[in-house]
Image (tube, rainbow, N blue to C red):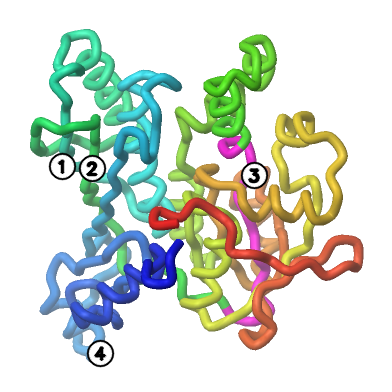
Amino acid sequence: MSDNTLSELEILELFRKELGLTRPHKLNLAGNTDDAAVMPLLPEDFAAYAANKKIKLGDRADSLVFAQDAMIENIHFRLEYGTAGQVADKCMAVNVSDLAAMGASPLGALVHVGLPKRYAVREFLTSLTKSLRRSMRRYKFTIFGGDLTAARDFTISAAFIGRINHRKAMFRNGAKAGDVLCVSGTLGLASLGLKLLENHRKGKLNSVKLDRYSGAVKRLLEPRPRLALGLKLAETGLATSCIDLSDSLARSLKLLARDSHVGFEVELSSRLLHREVRQYYGRLSPRKLADTVFSAEEDFELLFTMRASGLEQSRGLLPKGIIPIGTAIARKSGITANYRGKRIVVSNSGFEHFG
């Protein structure tokens, strides 16, 4: 990256400042640092509610949630790794994951497809549409419509609408020092899948070994967002902050820390890595273990905090597999990792669009 080129996060921050979108607004209660926006269905009712007037909103869904993500050929995916249907499935999953991190239920989506002429054939399009249909059934939403354009490379983008009660929405800014930091499952499987597919494409890995790690490839191409968990976390009010792990763990921790004005101390362990990842790498040095854990991307697990008193309560309310990985600490302490008493610096690793 040149001295004049801004990073992805710097570009987003520039947009927010120039557009005057640095704080929550009556039409977006989340502000503009979360991956989704929360708009009250009846802004005038919310204003009255916030002013303590006699309007009872109850527990009904009173707000819409908006999220949008795109996938572009040769940037987010290669079609030699999977089918058009898998790309569509993943695009829907990426958006649903953003809703899950806020605790919102999907309602519907507008889908844009940019289609090169070479892909305007029945087999390709049937794979695409059948996958979209399966996603609609799986996540219980509808496709409202969208847009179809010619494009140089295959592109699919979805703008999702969900619903939530604004008082139960989970944001990134609620963590407090002393909160327990948790992740909804093991990490590194999708990153391993990408590594294996890239090595296979370059002739560095044979098909037999690639098949041995089929779970890693499947996690990369067909992720499953933790929607049920996100809804449960919002319903119970146990989570004080939440973000989905589409980006690396390191970057996601940085975003939670920034918005909640805290630091984090992570207890590093090989148990944070999926079994297939541990099998592939074998015994890892502390530095390599840290790099593998903190650079893991696209697992689409939920990273969240909860009060220490809520950890025991959660055991009977939340599904198994949740892993406490650390603690929120004072902001001045930054983000650190401990491995068997040894402190390890956490780097801001992960994919960078403008790197």
Q: Earlier in the sequence, mark 3 or mark 2?
A: 2
**Mark 4 vs mark 3, CA separation in Å:** 44 Å
Q: CA distance from mark 2 to mark 4?
A: 37 Å
- Dot 1 falls on a residue whose secondary structure is strand
- Seen from the viewer's position, the closer of residues 268 and 235 is 268
Q: Considering only vertical position in the picture, is 17 above or below 296?
A: below
Residue displayed at 31% across by 60% down: 36
Task: Establish if 191 lies above or below 333.
Answer: above
Looking at the rendering, the stretch of residues picked out in magenta corresponds to 176-191
Q: Amino acid at mark 3?
A: Leu
Q: Is residue 168 visible?
A: no
Q: Which residue in the protein does label 1 denote?
A: 110
**Numbered disc 3: secondary structure:** loop
Q: Is residue 69 left or right of residue 289?
A: left
Residue depicted at 66% across the width and 61% down the height: 313
The residue identified by callout 2 is 158
Q: Is residue 266 magenta?
A: no
Measured as percent of width and height from the top left, residue 41 is found at 15, 65
- Distance from label 3 to label 2 (Cα)? 26 Å
Amino acid type of the residue that numbered disc 1 sits on in the rendered structure: Leu
Quadrant the N terminus occupies: bottom left
Mark 4 vs mark 3: which is more N-terminal? 4
Q: Residue 346 location, x and y as percent?
A: 68, 66
Residue type of the residue flagged with mark 2: Ala
Residue annotated with mark 4? 52
